[in-house]
Image (cartoon, rainbow, N blue to C red):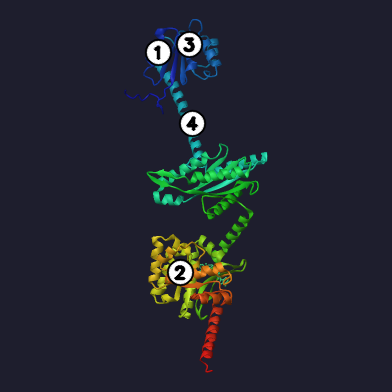
Amino acid sequence: MIADKNRPQHSSNIYPKILLIDDVQLNLIAVETLLKPLQAEIITANNGNLGLAKALEHDDIALILLDVNMPEMDGFEVARLLNDIQETANIPIIFLTASQPNEQHQLQAYKNGAVDYILKPLNPDVLISKVKIFINIWTMHFNMEQEIARRIIAEQEIEHLAMHDPLTQLPNRWHIHESMTQAISRAKRLNGKLAVLFLDLDGFKKINDELGHIAGDLFLKEISARFKRNIRSFDLIARYGGDEFIIVLTDIDDTLSLTNKLTKLTQAAAKAIYWHGKEMQAGVSIGVSLYPEHGTDSGSLIHCADNAMYQAKQAGRNTFRFYTQSLNDALQRKILLETHLRKALEFGELEVYYQPIVDTNTGEVIGAEALLRWFNKQLGTIAPDEFIKIAEDIGIIHQLGIWVLKEAVKVMQLHPLLSIAINVSALQFNNDQLIDAIQDYLAKGVIQARQIVVEITEGILLENTNQVQQRLECIKNKGVLLSIDDFGTGYSALSYLKRCPVNLLKIDRSFIIGVPDDRENATLIKGIIAMAHALGMQVVAEGVETAEQWLFLRELNCNTSQGYHFSPPLSLTQFNQYLKNSSSESASLQSQIRMPS
Ligand code: C2E
Ligand code: MG
Ligand code: MG
C-alpha cells in the first residue's frame, strides 16, 4: 500500500470507527466506498435503532454520519437519544440531508451534538475532508490519552522501584519505615504488640565470593521467598540491605508462639539450596525488639533489633536474641570506647607494660610479656580484655600491634639477654602486617630472633589452614619462638600440637589457681607439662600468685613462670628498676654462696 501523506499518523495500530446510519443501502455502500481509503473502520446501520445499538456496542467512534430522513426514527430523534446516553453523548455527529433543514431543526440538532451538515447528493471531496478532520481530532485525542496512560504507568513504576528491591520485589528500607509507622499507629490504637525482627544472613558473603553474584542473587531470592512463606499476609517484610531483612510480626500474643516463629525462620534459612549441582547453605542471625517495650517508632525499634542481631551473631549464628536494656548499656559503652580508642594512640594514651617471666627453677628473670595498657582521662583504665576486641572490630588492631612491637623492640635492644613475648590475636596473625614487621626487624639485624616470643591462642591452631601452617613455619624458620597462650582453655587436640611448630605452652591461669591443693588442676598441670616435654616443648605457667604454686611448678620442672608472686605487669621505668633490683639480688645471692664459711 502506498503511504498517503494526508492520512492521520497513528501512534498505534488502533483506528477510529465511523458509524454510518442511513436507511438506503445504496447510500451506505456509496459512502463506505468513499471513506474506504481513510484510516478508519466503517460500521453501518440501516435504521436508527440499529445505529443506536452499534454506537453503544463500539468504542472509539470518531464520527457518526447520520441520515436525517429515515422511517420510524429520523436522524434528529437518533441524535437526541445519542445525546441522552452518557456513553455516546460526546460522539460528534454530521447530518446527511437532501434539503437544508429549517432553523428550528438545525438548532435542535446542534443541541443534540450535531457538528455539521452535508447536503445530498454528497460531494466526495467535501465528505472526505470533513471526515478527515474528525479522524484527526480523534487521533490527537487518542494519542493524548495514550500518553497520559503511559505517564501514569511510568510514575507507578518509578514509585514501585523507589519503594521495592528489584531483586526480591520486597519492599525496601524506605518503604518498611513507612509501613511500620502505620503498623505502629494501628497497634497503638488497638493496644497491640509488635515484634520487629532484624535478620542478617550468616555466610552469605562466602556464597557470593565462591559461587558468584548470579548464585548469590538466586540465593537471596529463594531465602526471601522462604521468609515470606513463614509469615502471615498481614505481617511486614522488607529487604533492608545486602543480606539484611526486616520482618514485623503484628498481633503478637505470646512469647512462645513468637519463639516458635523465630525458630521456623532460622530453620528455613539454614536449609540448603542447590544450584548447578552445588550446595549453597547459610543461616540467619535474628535480633528481636518489641513494641512498645523497646521503642515507639520505626527507627528505634529497628536499631534495637539490629543491636540484638549482633548478640545473635556472637552467640554462634543461626539463632535469635531479644533486645535487652543491659545489651543497650553494653553497646553504648562499646560505642564510647570505639570513639576514644581511635584516638588513643595519637593522644598518647597507650603504654606497654612488662610482666617479668622467671626461670621457675632459679627465679631469675629471663624475659617479660608485653601487655598493652590504655588510660583515658574520661574513661579511666580500660582492661585489654575489653579494648583488644574493640580494636579488632574497628580495624585498628594491626596499627596497635605494630606499635606494641616497636615499643617491645626498644626493650629488646635495651636488654638483649631477655626475650620479650608479644600477644598476637587471631586477626593479627591472619594479616601480614605484624609478621612482616617482625621479619623486617630481624632482617635489618635490629633484634635477634631468640629475643622475641610470639604468643598466639589455640584458636589459630584449630583453624589449621594451609595459610596458618605456612605462617607458623615461616616464623619458626626465622628462629622466633612460638608460644600457645592460655593453653587448656581452648580445644587444642594433642594431634594438632604434634603437627604445629610450637616451642612453648603457656598454661592458663585458671589451672594454676588452687594448686597444689586442687587435686584435679594439679593432675592436669602434671599431664600438660609431661606431654609438652615429651613433644619437645617448654612450659610457661601464668598467674603464679603464691610461693606454694611456684614450688609445686618447680617440682614438676615447669620451665618458666609468670605472675603476681614475682611481679605484676610494670611500666618500662618500673621494669628497668625491677631488673636492676633482681640482678643485684641475685649478685648478692651469688656472693653469699661464694663467701667462705
Ligand atoms: P594474657 O596474654 O593471658 O596475659 C596475661 C594476663 O594475666 C594479663 O592481663 C596479666 O596482667 C594477667 N596476670 C598476670 N599475672 C597474673 C596473676 O598472677 N594473677 C592474675 N589474676 N592475673 C595475672 P592483662 O594485661 O589484663 O591482659 C589481658 C589479655 O589481653 C592478655 O592475656 C592478652 O590476651 C591481651 N593483650 C594484652 N596486651 C595485648 C596486646 O598488645 N596485643 C594483643 N593482641 N592482646 C593483648
Ligand atoms: Mg599472653
Ligand atoms: Mg595468657
Q: Identify the residue position indicated by label 4 in the image.
A: 149
Q: Residues within 10 Å of mark 3 (few under 14, many from 20)?
A: few
**Which mark is nearer the camera, 1 or 3?**
3
Q: Is residue 479 visible?
A: yes
Say which label, 2 or 4, has the lower sequence index. Answer: 4
* Quarter that holds the N terminus: top left
Dot 1 falls on a residue whose secondary structure is: helix
Q: Nearer the viewer, residue 564 or 374?
A: 564
Q: Choose mark 2 or mark 1, whichever is in front.
A: 2
**Comparing labels 2 and 3, the label whose residue is closer to the camera:** 2
Q: Amino acid at mark 4?
A: Ala
The residue tagged 3 is 50
Look at mark 1 in the image and give the residue it sits on.
31
Displayed quadrant of residue 334: bottom right
At horizontal 40% and vertical 17% (from top left) the residue drawn is 128
Q: Is residue 73 above or below residue 520?
A: above
The answer to which of marks 2 and 3 sits earlier in the sequence is: 3
- Residue 74 percent coordinates (x, y): 50, 8
Tag 2 residue: 531
Label 2, residues with CA under 10 Å away: few <14, some 14-19, many ≥20: some
Of the numbered discs 1 and 4, the one sitting upstream in the chain is 1
Determine whether the residue tagged by mark 3 lies in a helix, strand or loop.
helix
Q: Is mark 1 within 8 Å of ligand 1?
A: no
Q: CA distance from mark 1 to mark 4?
A: 34 Å
